[in-house]
Image: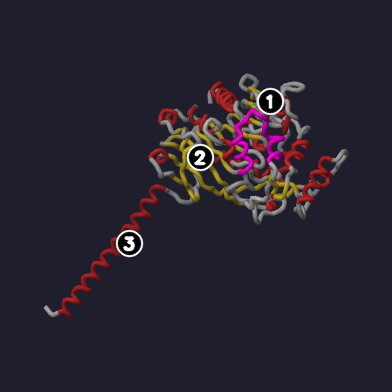
Amino acid sequence: MKIGSRFLLHHVVIIHVATVLIGVSQVLLRLGFFFRAIMWPDAVTAMSLPSSDLFTGLQFPQTLCNASYSFSADKKASCALGNINVTTTSTNTNLVLSPPADGMALTEIFVELQQSGSNFTTAVTSGGPLEVTGTYSIFIKLCVPTDAGARSDMRTVQLLTHGATLDNTYWDMAPGYSYVDAAAMAGYATLSYDRLGTGRSDHPDPLHVVQTPVEVDIIHELVGNLKAITFDGRGLENVVGVGHSLGSAISQGVTTKYPKDFDAVILTGAPANSTCLNAAFASFSYAPAVSDPSGRFSGLSTAYLTLGAIPQASQFAFWRYPHYDKKLFDQQVATKQTSTLGELLTISLVLVPSANYTSPVAVVNGINDAVYCCGDCSYPTNQAQVLIYDFYPNASKSGSQTFLQPDAGHIQAGHHTAQQGFQRMLSFLKDNGL
């Protein structure tokens, strides 16, 4: 055979092999889509979490976007993380207020809120009702016990709602300071999330959209998703609402508007009244988040707020010295999040009696909470008991409980006595058969 003929044959063979490889790759590509279709049976309405054998049997009625998987702080829980879309229609308040021009203008708002005889709140909220409809991307962290035995008995999921200037990591701060770990060891699933306007969730209009009524309705939608979960073909029987600080106030709003959503509710860092809030607001040294020296909040409206840049802005209201881990204090200061003027000005909308709620309530507060108890939740009487008496007249009398966590300020999960608080929360659930 001549060299030219050999050269031509060689190229024909290469072209043929390439054609075969392209065909094989197309088949594999189709098979890849096929397998993904099995793992995610309906990409619009359902998802499966196939990253490990542990999550293979979990079906959640939403698509989890940008999914990732991790352990909790002490690896007692295995977690799926990502964003889901939540659509709500809510009746907010048309606030007669513009975003503050700068930090000084923001400070003046809080000065006028605290002024004796002030009608500032009445004037600002005089714009009447405002219906708000939207679809929001909400970051969630769904965790189940890593231990197979604890997972096999799992019947209840706890929905964890964090407070202002915090995010979902409040519930999973570090080994020994993680409620997610404690709950997993007791056989519970948990879903923590970044509230609207916080962390990795959407940041819409902070005056007219991110208000407490929208946040109540977001929890209601999350509850609906949790009630539709199946794990290895079986559903979870109970949903428990757990809140901290503003998250407790919003959870109270859920028990008022949707009294059948929760089979029980646990309120931590919870408000019996607003007497001490003015001092707390002053201590926070709120500033427009966009001006924070960290640069983490660039591009946000000046109606998105964060704590002042000095550590004392956190210490005064949140921590009780010296009863906490300094590393956790530094961590909270470094990772502080946002709040909005809209939610702060509409707290009163959710702090109303939940007369139609009849399930059990637990209130677990740090005894030295400065935000809601002015530093002593036992004075002049147990403020946790006052909350249940004032806001839950028809809650289960035999099932409801209170506990004042010793040597703890508002950030209860970061104090050395955190486990005492966690165990009382979990024993409350066990006592009520949940």
Q: Which residues are magenta?
A: 311-334
* Kind of element beneath mark 1: loop
Judging by the rendered image, the residue that carries numbered circle 2 is 142
Alpha carbon of mark 2 to alpha carbon of mark 1: how far? 30 Å
Return the residue at label 3: 26
Answer few, some or many: residues within 10 Å of disc 1's Cα (few below 14, many 20 plus, some between 14 and 19). many
Nearer to us: label 2 or label 1: 1
For marks 3 and 1, give the CA distance. Answer: 65 Å
> Can you give x and y, in whole percent of width and height, for residue 118 in the image?
86, 41
Q: CA distance from mark 3 to mark 2?
A: 35 Å
Name the residue furthest left.
1
| Sequence-earlier tag: 3 or 1 | 3
**Residue type highlighted by circle 2:** Leu
Residue 427 position in % (x across, y down): 56, 23
Q: Is residue 136 visible?
A: yes
Earlier-in-chain disc, 2 versus 1: 2
x and y, in percent, of residue 291 in the image: 70, 52
